[in-house]
Amino acid sequence: MSIFTYANPQRFLRFVHYVLLPVLLIGGVLSAVGLYAAFALAPADYQQGETVRIMYIHVPAAWLSMACYGLMALSSIGTLVWRHPLADVSARAMAPIGAAFTIICLVTGSLWGRPMWGTWWVWDARLTSVLVLFLIYCGILALWNAFEDPARAGRAAAVMTLVGAINLPIIKFSVDWWNTLHQPASVFRMGGPTIDKSMLWPLLLVAIGMTIVMIGLHLAAMRNEILARRLRTMRVMAASGEGHAH
Amino acid sequence: MLTDPHFGFIFAAYFIAALIFLGVSLWIWVDHRHVTRALDELEQTGLRRRSEREKG
């Protein structure tokens, strides 16, 4: 099976029809179990107290905000290099989902920062680069809506997405390159996680569950985008008097 | 946890996250209903895409 197996939109729609509900159910159940463990089984932090519970939604949202953008960047390569028929559909469908996870990350981070740091916001490198990520998502969404032809919009958005991808390593390494108030990486780091196992497994469970839900939402949004393009084509045909069965 | 002085922050974080997440999910669902209904209406007028007409 190659990336072109589901290049046919009709085949892709059939695929989504069968997998969407199971994917959303599996992701939802894993997220729910993970959140139950985060609240009922994981201990409070010795310094942060109960406020550490915010981490179980903030950290997966932060990871997914970057993962969504990474997938958009891969889709953009698919648009510009291979002209894959579903690549720009994928990129367009992912942008609002990625923007949603980014705003969740920013808001929950701010709600954690107020009691822990004593401030809602600081202009440190990590927070600022995530805010820039959100603004890039907004810019890409605006660019998609600025063109009437989805193919032209797709190419322009793909170029912008790839330029904006430079922000991903900046977000990841901002806590190492600059002196930030935001703590350094405690899960994905050389030498292994520094977070205690009793907190790590619920966090990973929520993250895996939310990732599967994100995949489900992405498939659903891609289906909508394919149908919207089909609708646009049919409206053009109706306007030109073409397409009626005789 | 309910008696924790920072409970309001924890509640607000999960409440807002759920609101945003449900908002996106609802938007995708409503968009799907809207676009499938519009496609059905066009097809009821006898309009067919080229690939559909070729199929017969």
Image (spheres, grey):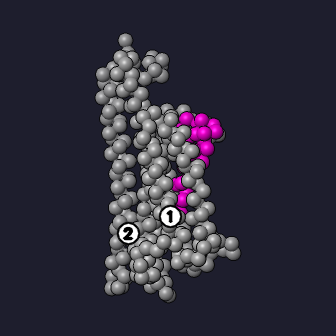
Q: Provide the residue designation for mark 2.
A: B14
Q: Position of residue A34 (x, y in %)?
A: 47, 68
Residue A177 is situated, as x and y percent measured from the top left of the image, at 63, 71
| Placement of the C terminus of chain A among the 4 image quadrants | top left
Residue drawn 35% across and 31% down?
A: B39
Left-right relation of A239 to A56: left
Q: Amino acid at mark 2?
A: Tyr
Q: Amino acid at mark 1?
A: Val
Image height of A230 relative to A59, above or below: above
Look at 46% across and 20% down and name the residue there: B50
Residue A79 sits inside the magenta stretch: yes
Residue A125 in percent (x, y) is at: 54, 70
Q: Quadrant of the N terminus of chain A?
A: top right
Taking the view exactly as shown, the residue that stands out farthest to the top is A246
Label 1 sits on residue = A130
Looking at the rendered structure, which numbered label has been put on residue A95? none
Which tag is nearer the camera, tag 1 or tag 2? 1
Q: Quadrant of residue A81?
A: top right
